[in-house]
Amino acid sequence: MKRLALLPLISALMFAGSAQAHQVWLEQNAKSASLYFGEFGENLRETSPGLLDKFVKPSATLVGAKGEQALTLTKGEKSYVLSGRAGKNETIYAEEANYPVIERKEGDKIVSRMIWTPAARLITSNAAVEPKLTLDIVPTGKQGEFKVTYKGQPLPKAKVGIIVQSGWGKEAYSDEQGLVDFDTPWAGTYVLEVHHTDKTPGERNGAAYDSASFVTTLSLTQPTGVKALPAPPAATPNK
């Protein structure tokens, strides 16, 4: 199944004619956590120099037993490396809330102004988590169940995709309580993705916009299950 394509218009506007829709997601190993930009299901990680440089000032927060801790992000060749990682029952959330307003023109006339907010969350268990991101997807405490929220309230009828790096994936819609369920048969890392558009005008950093588009992912690693299929060869980053 091909990965759920999100925000094609924004992608075209942002990336000089590129038709790909991109996401940010979090991954971690035994030593560190990193924020990636690209296509998880296509094994595409944008780099610096390159599209990773499009970001202005992403932020990240670790939430654990000691409360919330702001993390430092250091841009590397293939990701932003975070100054901390999540332990058992902890979570990290990150977002880029400073991307400039995107203008769409017809000739010399500006016909719309839009903001784009990519965000990501990483969890280390299915323990229930309180939403923090404007558009968020969090575990509820039940295996395979997640809740989609917008501005802290349940978001019904939101299309949610789940995918592993081999390209296997599924889609489902949240119910009236914002809840969605997925089976996770494979061992390894999964990324869930949801997007939402709010057509309420507003301002970002003093610049007016007509609509706001959000895309948020949630990453989880499952140690048990069917052996995961191999990931596709690494895709070539855009320049």
Image: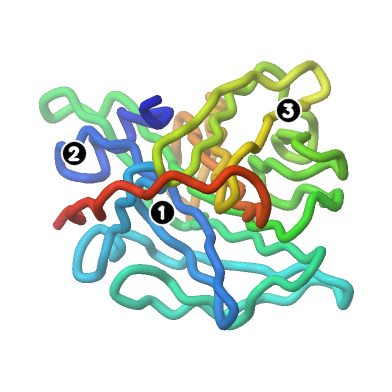
Residue 179 against residue 120 in the figure, above or below: above
Amino acid type assigned to the residue bearing label 3 in the image: Asp
Q: Position of residue 79 (x, y in %)?
A: 38, 69
* Residue at 26%, 36% in the rendered image: 20
Amino acid type assigned to the residue bearing label 1 in the image: Tyr
State the mark number for residue 181: 3
What secondary structure is marked by label 1?
loop
* Residue at 77%, 27% in the rendered image: 179
**Residue to which mark 1 is pinned:** 99
Cα–Cα span, label 1 and label 3: 32 Å
Q: Could you tell me if the residues under marks 1 and 3 are in contact, i.e. CB atoms within 8 Å?
A: no
Q: In the image shown, does 224 or 135 lie closer to the viewer?
A: 224
Residue 88 against residue 224 in the figure, above or below: below
Residue 5 against residue 163 in the figure, above or below: above
Quarter the N terminus occupies: top left
What secondary structure is marked by label 3?
strand
Q: Is residue 127 left or right of residue 224?
A: right
Cα–Cα span, label 2 and label 1: 18 Å
- Give the mark nearer the N terminus: 2 vs 1: 2
- Give the mark nearer the N terminus: 3 vs 2: 2
- Give the mark nearer the N terminus: 1 vs 3: 1
Amino acid type assigned to the residue bearing label 2 in the image: Ser
State the mark number for residue 18: 2
